Image (tube, rainbow, N blue to C red):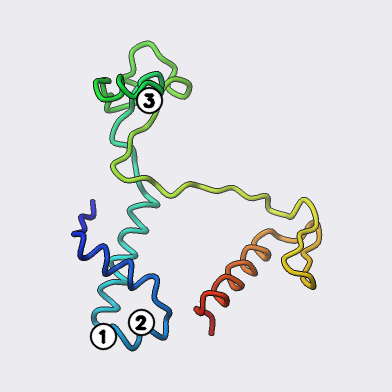
Amino acid sequence: MIALTQEKREELKAFLSASIEKRCTVYTLAKQRELEALRDQIALASITAQPFGYVEEDAVKDRERLFSAQVFADEEDLPGYEFSELSCPLYLYPPVPAVKFPEKLPCDVSVSPNVVFRKGVNTQVLLNCLIRKSDDSNGLGD
């Protein structure tokens, strides 16, 4: 678990939203490394998040019941229920959602008036282009 003070949270937020050029002028190298390590810890914790317990799905739908619902430590502890249908995992911190994309583009995709990715192109190529375009528009590109 990673505990952050409000001050450390604000500092990390400012660091992450600053451009690379600004980071080099505002933060010392040691401070940059400290904040980058903290960022990496948070990313790893989010990617590897495991539920600490489960509640019945009905309790989640009824907010009044949620706060008095019994939390089960493991999916097998749920009394007489099929886990996959009637349970909801509980996390201390939300995990990073797993997003699934098709391996190949199912149709043509226009990114700008003069850039078109044709049906069948590897989806990762399109994603890389969008990331680069976003970085360029945010001043993070080379």
Quickly name the residue at label 3.
60
Q: Amino acid type of disc 3?
A: Val
Q: Secondary structure at mark 2?
A: helix
Mark 2 is on which residue type? Arg
Q: Is residue 33 above or below residue 122?
A: below
Q: Which residue is mark 1?
A: 28
The residue type indicated by label 1 comes to Thr
* Quarter where residue 8 is shown: bottom left
User: Sequence order check: which comes first, mark 1 or mark 3?
Assistant: 1
* x then y, percent, for residue 109: 76, 59
27 is higher (above) or lower (below) than 57: below
Residue wearing tag 2: 23
Q: Name the residue located 24 percent from the left edge and 79 percent from the top edge.
A: 31
Pointer 2 local density, CA inside 10 Å: few below 14, some 14–19, many at least 20 = some
Mark 1 Cα-neighbour bin, 10 Å: few <14, some 14–19, many ≥20 = few
Q: Residue 29, relative to residue 96: is it above or below?
A: below
Q: Position of residue 54 (x, y in %)?
A: 33, 27
User: How would you rate the neighbour count of disc 3 (Cα within 10 Å): few for under 14, some for 14-19, many for 20 or more?
Assistant: some
Which residue is nearer to you in this view: 51 or 18? 18
| Discs 1, 3 touching: Cβ within 8 Å | no
